[in-house]
Image (cartoon, helix red, strand yellow):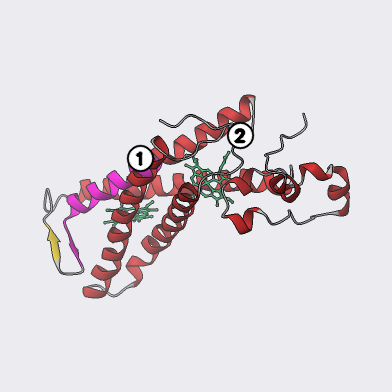
Amino acid sequence: MQPVNPRADRYDAVTIAFHWATAVLVVAQWIGAQVIDLFPAGSPRVDARSVHITGGLLLAVLLLMRLAWRATRGRRLPLPDTGALNLLAKGTHWGLYALLVMMVLVGMFLVWVRGDSLFNLVSIPAYDPGNRVLTHQVQELHGTIGWMILALAGLHAAAALIHRYVWRDAVLGRMLPGSWARRPTPVLSAAGAQSQPASLATGAASQAGRTPQRQP
Ligand code: HEM
Ligand code: HEM
């Protein structure tokens, strides 16, 4: 496994691409699941569900590739926080990975339990036809994990935005594509701008090629 690189100031392009593709796909999956039942029963609803299942399989492949990349050639950076915040960040990241893996496994199990058809082309026979209770329970579990992912990802995104707009450091920039990472942090208030030394501002820091630490 590649060691943590304390000197690099950004994640590599592949890691960044995996991160944002996963984030977009998770949100699309969640929205997609909410609209399946709005489609008329029959082929339109089968197609809508098939899109959700196909997106789920794509997410499974993406997740496997992402974890393999992280474990081999992907750049890993030391977390910027210390103490409790460091533990919280680590717990959030591994919690998100764990929930995503569970989501994919429970989703696949759900397809198998209820029996499904992919675009009316491929049919997946039900493991226990007519067992509505089991189907309902697995579906509930799938929906609950979905909410947990959204909640944790929301906190995680809020933390990234606090780093950028409140603490004004370069943490978010580490996970942004080059042109976005180099944008200076917008000044939210005159007071906020004056209270920070210029070297801590995201733009200045990334141009200088380092990740500034917050002052204690
Ligand atoms: C992060 C990825 C995913 C999210 C956010 C997500 C979200 C959801 C949600 C919120 C529901 C509705 C649950 C309920 O009615 O209580 C659902 C249903 C479903 N999901 Fe997923 N899902 C994901 C991945 C998957 C995967 C990987 C599969 C299978 C390969 C899958 C297959 C299904 C199926 C078959 C249903 C039932 C649809 C229906 O009742 O018509 N999902 N999903
Ligand atoms: C469903 C949505 C998301 C998921 C599942 C997700 C997942 C993750 C995971 C697992 C990591 C750890 C990477 C590693 O070390 O292997 C990470 C890092 C990161 N994410 Fe997200 N993320 C999501 C959305 C977001 C959003 C919306 C933002 C920004 C607003 C964001 C900003 C970041 C940043 C800046 C890092 C690097 C943190 C650091 O180096 O300390 N993420 N994300």
Residue at the image point whose x is 30% and y is 65% from the top: 51
Of residue 80 and residue 2, the one placed in the foreground of this image is 2
The residue tagged 1 is 68
> Mark 1 and mark 2: span between their CA atoms?
23 Å
Q: Is residue 87 left or right of residue 69?
A: right
User: Which mark's residue is nearer the viewer, 1 or 2?
Assistant: 2
Q: Where the N terminus falls, by quadrant? A: top left
Residue 40 in percent (x, y) is at 28, 75
Q: Quadrant of residue 118?
A: bottom left
- Drawn side of residue 62 relative to residue 209, left or right: left
Number of other residues with Cα within 10 Å of mark 2, as a class: few under 14, some 14 to 19, many 20 or more: few
Residue drawn at (39%, 45%) of the image: 66
Across and down, in percent, residue 67 comes to 38, 40
Specify the amino acid type for callout 2. Arg
Judged from the image, the secondary structure of the residue bearing numbered disc 1 is helix
Reading the chain from its start, which is encountered first: label 1 or label 2?
2
Q: Is 118 drawn above or below residue 198 in the view shown? A: below
Is 65 colored magenta in this rendering? no
Residue type highlighted by circle 1: Ala
Ligand 1 image-quadrant field? bottom left
Is the CB of the residue bearing disc 2 within 8 angstroms of ligand 2?
Answer: no
- Residue range (magenta): 99-118
Q: Is residue 95 above or below residue 109?
A: above
Who is closer to the viewer here, 64 or 118?
Answer: 64
Residue at the spot of label 2: 7
150 or 11: which is nearer to us? 11
Residue 91 horizontal side relative to residue 133, left or right:
right
